[in-house]
Amino acid sequence: MMDEDADAVAVVGIGCHFPGGEGLENFWRVLFHGKNCAIKIPNDRFDLTQWYDSDTRKPGKTYTEKAALIDGLNDFDHKFFGITEAETVNMDPQHKLLLQCTYRALEDAGIPMEKASGTRTGVFLGLMNRDFELGSVRISPKHIDHSYSTGLAMSIAANRISYTFNFTGPSLSIDSACSSSLVALHFACQAMNQGDCEMAVCGGVSCILEPTVFVALSKANMISPDGTSKPFSSKADGYGRGEGCGVVFLKPLKKALQDHDHIWGIISKTAVNQDGHTVSPITKPSMIQQEELLRKIYSTVTELTSVQYIEAHGTGTPVGDPVEAGMDSMLAMTLQNNIFKDRGVNVPLVTLLDPNSKLSSLIKILQDNSVEDHESKDESISTYL
């Protein structure tokens, strides 16, 4: 069926670095064993003694001291990518991770850099964290040079990939909060289908370097005190923050079949919408608009009956979880039977990776969608379901 879909997109390469180690094998190991990767935030990120207090009422303090962090955050072979050591100093670690994971995705796709060079390949990235930029504000003006602006700019995160690999398709970075990487995926598919590019790199990245977001989330009661998300559980008390990077390499399905590529998975349809003013406050998800989006995606009974698995956002918050649970119920009621083989959530294993969270979920599904939601084994499974 998918072979006949002119707009279908194939995922032919994957590169990633998530908590638990670089590469697909390490990511799979974390998922398979249900490992909780949240650790106490080390001093090389920021000084917890100045920012942490278990008293939730303390102003200017965060009540969590844990996050899921990657090893070797700044390990980077600048010579391999043709970047000077001086430029590397002012380069956001997110840019470094994206370059590394893009190379791994090309390698996984079996495409040498020389062969990819000069192709109309687009770059579509999702990122929102500006920790490196915030930390750089405190830098002494005498240390600012020509590489300072390019090392910080979110636009350059995508443009640097295009420059390094000599890709000539559209190149842009998108910030739509936690959905950033999936919105980037949507635009990547759209760009290929309308001929703006012949292939595409799609990625998401997040690095934790600054405490200010922790404080803001603590004051909003959105973050978990123990740094771990517990989606759809009665123990849910907010989400845990994490960092990492994931990149997928995309081709039109027909082209991938012609090239005899290894195909990790097929993207048959994507859609994007916004809540507008259907719900308040602005941070609350709208069940109305989520239902509208699902009806747009599954516009026929055939499409709806093909659903066998749902990957949830699963923040582990009393606001977000009921909305997602309601979406599951809506789909099931529409078909009047149990259509789902499983529901999956990455969050309890590696926490929420901010703009990269949904790309990590996509990569998990592409590897094997049989990984169980470990939180579903909890006897305190949510009363929301």
Image: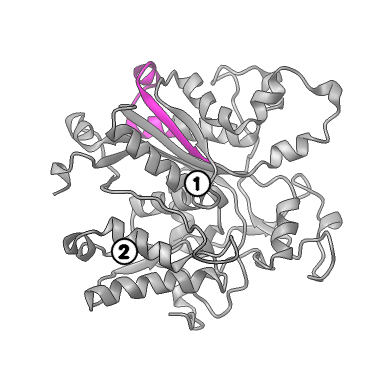
Q: Which of marks 2 and 1 precedes in the sequence? A: 1
Q: Position of residue 85 (x, y in %)?
A: 68, 19
- Can see residue 19? no
Q: Is residue 11 above or below residue 347?
A: above
Q: Residues within 10 Å of mark 2 (few under 14, many from 20)?
A: some
Q: Which mark is residue 180?
A: 1
Residue 376 horizontal side relative to residue 38, left or right? left
- Can see residue 77? yes
Whole-angstrom CA distance, mark 1 to mark 2, is: 22 Å
Residue 338 horizontal side relative to residue 26, left or right? left
Query: Residue at 82% across / 51% down in the picture?
Result: 47
Element marked by disc 1: helix
Q: Is residue 292 above or below residue 104?
A: below
Q: Quadrant of the C terminus?
A: bottom left
Q: Is residue 124 magenta?
A: yes
Residue 71, image quadrant = top right
Q: Amino acid at mark 2?
A: Tyr
Q: Is residue 202 magenta?
A: no
Q: Which residues are magenta?
A: 104-126
The furthest residue to the front: 277
Is disc 1 in contact with disc 2, using a CB cutoff of under 8 Å? no
Q: Position of residue 333 (x, y in %)?
A: 28, 77
Q: Which mark is residue 309?
A: 2
Query: Residue at 33% across / 29% down in the picture?
Result: 199
Element marked by disc 2: strand
Q: Amino acid at mark 1?
A: Ser
Residue 89, image quadrant = top right
Q: Position of residue 6 (x, y in %)?
A: 18, 39
Q: Position of residue 74 (x, y in %)?
A: 65, 35
Q: Is residue 76 above or below residue 224?
A: above
